[in-house]
Image (cartoon, grey):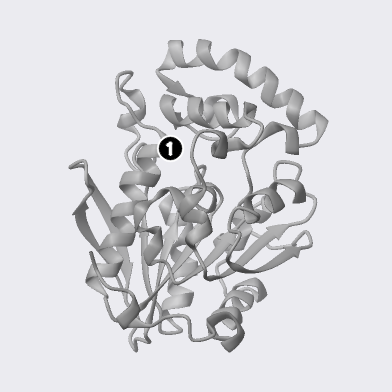
Amino acid sequence: MEYRELIKTKDGREMMISIFRPESENNHMIVIGQGAMMEQSLYNNFADFLAGSGYTIISFSYRGLDKPEWLMKKKAEVSIMHWAMQDLDAALLFARHRYPAKELIFLAHGLSGEIAGISAASTYINRMIMISSGLTCSRLRPLRIRILLFLMKRILPVLIFLFGYYPGKKLRYLTDLPAGVIREWSSWCSNENGLFDDFPDNNYCRLRIPVLSISFAGNPFLPEAAIRALLSRYSNANIRWVNLPKTSLKNTGNDENAFFASEEPAEFWNLIRVWLESEASYNGYFNQQEKMLP
């Protein structure tokens, strides 16, 4: 059963979260971190599937993605740092305080896996699943993608001046994004080491947890080099990386969307459930007494 609750971030912003409560609960909860180009509703079927297995599921939207009117405000300051240090942080802290006896599992889609370590509350994550997460860095992409990103950087200032935000839906490339988010993302593309040229990886190194990384082979926007570069920052994690072949899932032409958008449980969903229930991935890491609340 899904219900919604209003919480507040540290900077005072109200944020709506969705909670999927199973009929019969186990000792685990999963916080779903949204992909930067996705709507929160994309994860509903997947959340229902996991709730059916006893997991308590919490999902949320980053600011600027949940309320389109944010995009129309030219003075609205929304950045990826806000997403990580305020919105994601609030969701993780809510989960830990509301369900202190449950293991906290973070399912990070896309950019959420890249920024997880920026959130101070990431230290409460006991296990993590990353779907299509890699380092945002142009040098790790194939030549044609690097050219596309180069051209995009040149027209960004004009688009933001005209619209006040990045009009991805009008351009049919990416989606509508706040100006600060697309500027920061563009800056990371130009860095030698992506976001890690601007932000230390200290929290990433502290995550001594089991991690399952799932990606899709043949994706030019997320090549294996970018995935390896990000996973290397989780240097003390116990990582299993599964690079799936191109799928034939229906409902969408995008593998990444199809992973979540299937109307029926897919074999890849079962891959996640099997990993979650595997002693090899759990390995007795979670201990309630070791995870004290602040």
On-image quarter of the C terminus: bottom left
Q: Quadrant of the N terminus?
A: bottom left
Q: Looking at the picture, tell me which residue is in the foreground, 25 or 259.
A: 25
Q: At x 31% / y 57%, what residue is drawn? A: 91
Q: Which residue is mark 1?
A: 80
Q: Residue 53's x, y, as percent?
A: 46, 84
Side (left or right) of 57 relative to 148: left
Q: Is residue 235 left or right of residue 247?
A: left
SS at mark 1 in the image: helix
Q: Quadrant of residue 48?
A: bottom left
Q: Residues within 10 Å of mark 1 (few under 14, many from 20)?
A: many
Kindly identify the amino acid type of the residue bearing the numbered disc 1.
Ile
Q: In front here: 73 or 12?
A: 12
Q: Is residue 27 above or below residue 93?
A: below
Q: Quadrant of residue 232?
A: bottom right
Closest to the observer, 90 or 54: 90
Which residue corresponds to the image point at 57% horizontal and 27% vertical from the top-left? 186
Which residue is painted at 80% across and 29% down in the image?
A: 144
Whole-percent x, y for residue 119 in the image? 39, 51
Residue at the spot 53% in from the left edge and 47% down from the top edge: 111
Query: Taking the image as drawn, is residue 223 in sight?
Result: no
Can you see residue 42?
A: yes
Residue 50 in the figure: left or right of residue 256: left
Give percent across and percent down for residue 282. Answer: 53, 82
Q: Position of residue 26 (x, y in %)?
A: 38, 87
Q: How many marks?
A: 1
Left or right for 227, reference 36: right
Depth check: 88 or 251 in front? 88
Q: Is residue 152 above or below residue 161?
A: below
